[in-house]
Amino acid sequence: MSIKISIFQNSPIPLFGLPQAPTIIILFFLAILGSVISVFIFPRLFTPLFLKLKGLIRRKYKDAYIEIQPRCFSRNMLIRRWIYIFLLELGILAFLVPAINPALFLSLEYGPSYYESLGVPPEYTIGVLISLTFLTLPFVNGLWSIGWVMEDAGLMHYKFEKEERNRLYEIEPVYRNYSYYLKGYAGISSILFLYNVIIAWIQVTSESRIADIIASIFLPAIAILLSIPSYIIYGKFVNKKFLIHQDLKQLQILDESQILEG
């Protein structure tokens, strides 16, 4: 018995009171539309908030920007950002799946008790995982878009040491301060998700579960495909319209000869 039996049942799903197929279709469009909305809203609401919090924590640093040409659609940038979308999706599922009642996303006929009687973990069936992936994707894209905006805008901060004996300076991209926390969470919690999936399926001894483990791990990768429309809109409109550095001074870009003596 495979986890494939958990999808496209004709009996109603409690979430919307519809069969599983139309429920998945609704969630599919909500994921795409919600992601488009989130890449517009999250940067405008939370980027200024993050900069204020950063200013309180790192008071010695001043914000500025460098003039750069955003590389939103370069191959390396796309691969990097899509990987982190996938990892953050896994990270959110790692904590959401154990906390959600799987009965909300399973048909009344084939609910949790049905799968439990087979020894199958209902929370890691396709119907549950794909529904939660669709529901959380706008949040994932919104969180990453905050860092994308700061990176594509060339936002920097710098600090000069005022002491005569230690006249050094530091300068770094602001987005790294934000992304490090998000990447750290995504990396650690995605490992937790992998652990939870393996433990859940390995306890099913009725037959080999290698295929089910692989499916449960890589099913959330559909988040990458569903993120494409919102990312195109972000790259074409959002990062060009959101002038986060309009009140900041521009930094001069130095080359190696300007910072080395001789």
Image (spheres, grey):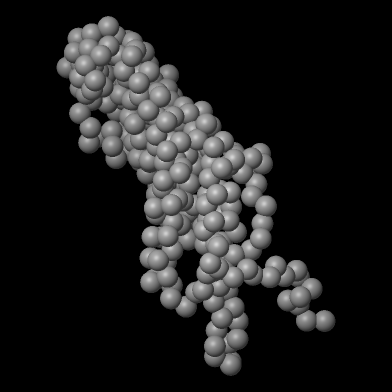
Q: Please name whichever residue, 97 or 239, is drawn nearer the observer in this view of the structure.
A: 239
For residue 77, side relative to residue 179 (left or right): right
Q: In which quarter of the image is residue 169?
A: bottom right
Total numbered labels placed on residues in the image: 0
Tell me which residue sits at (58%, 87%) in the image. 166
Q: Please name whichever residue, 242 or 30, is drawn nearer the observer in this view of the structure.
A: 242
Tell me which residue sits at (46%, 42%) in the image. 39
| Position of residue 173 measured from the top left corner of the image (x, y, whole percent) | 56, 62
| Position of residue 102 measured from the top left corner of the image (x, y, whole percent) | 23, 25
| Position of residue 259 measured from the top left corner of the image (x, y, whole percent) | 73, 76
In the displayed structure, 75 sits above or below 69; it is: above
In the displayed structure, 146 sits above or below 99; it is: below
Tell me which residue sits at (48%, 29%) in the image. 226
Furthest residue toward right: 262
| Position of residue 216 measured from the top left corner of the image (x, y, whole percent) | 39, 25
- On the question of residue 126 being in view, the answer is no
Q: Quadrant of residue 99?
A: top left
Q: In which quarter of the image is the C terminus?
A: bottom right
Tell me which residue sits at (29%, 9%) in the image. 9
Furthest residue toward bottom: 164
Q: Quadrant of the N terminus?
A: top left
In the displayed structure, 151 sits above or below 228; it is: below
